[in-house]
Image: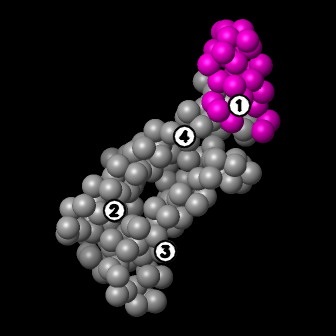
Amino acid sequence: MALELFRAQGVQQTSMREIAERLGITKPALYYHFASREDLLLSLVQPLVEDGEAALAEEEAAGSVDPRLLLTRYFDLCMRHRDVIAVVLRDAATLLQLDLAARVLDWRRRITLLLAGPEATLPELARVTLVLGGMGDCIALLGDRPDGELRPAVLDAACTALGLGGE
């Protein structure tokens, strides 16, 4: 419920009173569980952070990278958490307040290193950067499309842009 309100109205425009009413509880009952709107948002963002860190740690520990599989995992992670990502991206202040901007940039840097390698040239780094940003844009702008259509289209485009070919 809170996530729906945050997505529809923005974090700063959504009051704890509105959230409590939508949940059918009192405002004090909501404050019993969350000290602030930001604490509530953090509880909604935490699964994304945990999933992202776990996926990256697993990829980094694997020793070798299957680029298409890595892109697929990245896409699936973003799709699974697209509502939270949309809320956070809608409000830049929230992104900074939760220190997510630095974390997301770190994830992108780590994924770029996995895909391009430590000795990557500037054109290779640029290509991976464009692919990761483009995948995020596809999810943000086309995320309402059926997953069975969006997923292969985005992954094929990403792999083609990286010179990996389609499936």
State the SS at label 1: helix
The answer for how far apart the CA atoms under marks 4 and 1 are is 12 Å
Residue 71 numbered tag: 2
Q: Considering only order in the chain, which callout, 1 or 3, is on the residue closer to the N terminus? A: 1
Q: Position of residue 63 (x, y in %)?
A: 20, 67
Measure the C-alpha gap from mark 3 to mark 1: 34 Å
14 sits to left or right of 80 = right
Q: CA distance from mark 3 to mark 4?
A: 25 Å
The residue type indicated by label 3 comes to: Leu
Compared to 143, does 26 lie above or below?
A: above
Residue under label 4: 45
Q: CA distance from mark 4 to mark 2?
A: 21 Å
Element at badge 2?
helix
Residue shown at 62% from the left, 19% from the top: 33
The residue pinned by badge 3 equals: 130
Q: Picture quarter containing residue 32?
A: top right
